[in-house]
Amino acid sequence: MPDALVNIDLDRERNLREIADEIAKISNVQWARLVLGPDDVIAYIETANWLELETTLFEIGAVDGVVKTDSRILFPK
């Protein structure tokens, strides 16, 4: 089961909480939280296979207000 953490930069001229909530609604996104630091949101993704992971990452990147993503694939437990 591939899973990942995704660091996300958002358009600061928009409502960051609304964008984070939209990301959290994407299938396979377990949670998306606003954070303080160089990134605006961190999301945790769990998927059944690599194709689902790829699709989910593309869906996050396509959310209106997402400027940049930086994904970290996690080692299996």
Image: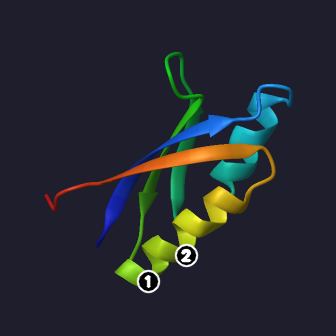
**Residue appearing at x 53%, y 16% in the figure:** 36
Quarter-of-image position of residue 48? bottom left
Where residue 16 appears, as percent x and y from the top left, is: 76, 30
**As drawn, is 55 to the left or to the right of 66?**
left
Where residue 65 appears, as percent x and y from the top left, is: 78, 44
Q: Is residue 26 above or below residue 38?
A: below
Tell me the SS state at disc 2.
helix
Q: Are marks 1 and 2 in contact (CB under 8 Å)?
A: yes
Tell me the SS state at disc 1.
helix
Q: Residues within 10 Å of mark 2 (few under 14, many from 20)?
A: some
Q: Is residue 44 above or below residue 58?
A: above
Q: Residues within 10 Å of mark 1 (few under 14, many from 20)?
A: few
**Residue appearing at x 59%, y 68% in the figure:** 58
Question: Which residue of the protein is positioned furthest toward the front in this rendering?
Answer: 68
Where residue 77 appears, as percent x and y from the top left, is: 13, 58
For the question of whether residue 29 can be seen, the reply is yes
Give the labeled residue for mark 1: 51
For the question of whether residue 49 can be seen, the reply is no
Where residue 21 appears, as percent x and y from the top left, is: 73, 43
Question: Which residue of the protein is positioned furthest toward the right in this rendering?
Answer: 14
Q: Is residue 77 above or below residue 17?
A: below
Which image quadrant: the N terminus?
bottom left
Q: Amino acid at mark 1?
A: Leu
Q: Which mark is residue 55?
A: 2
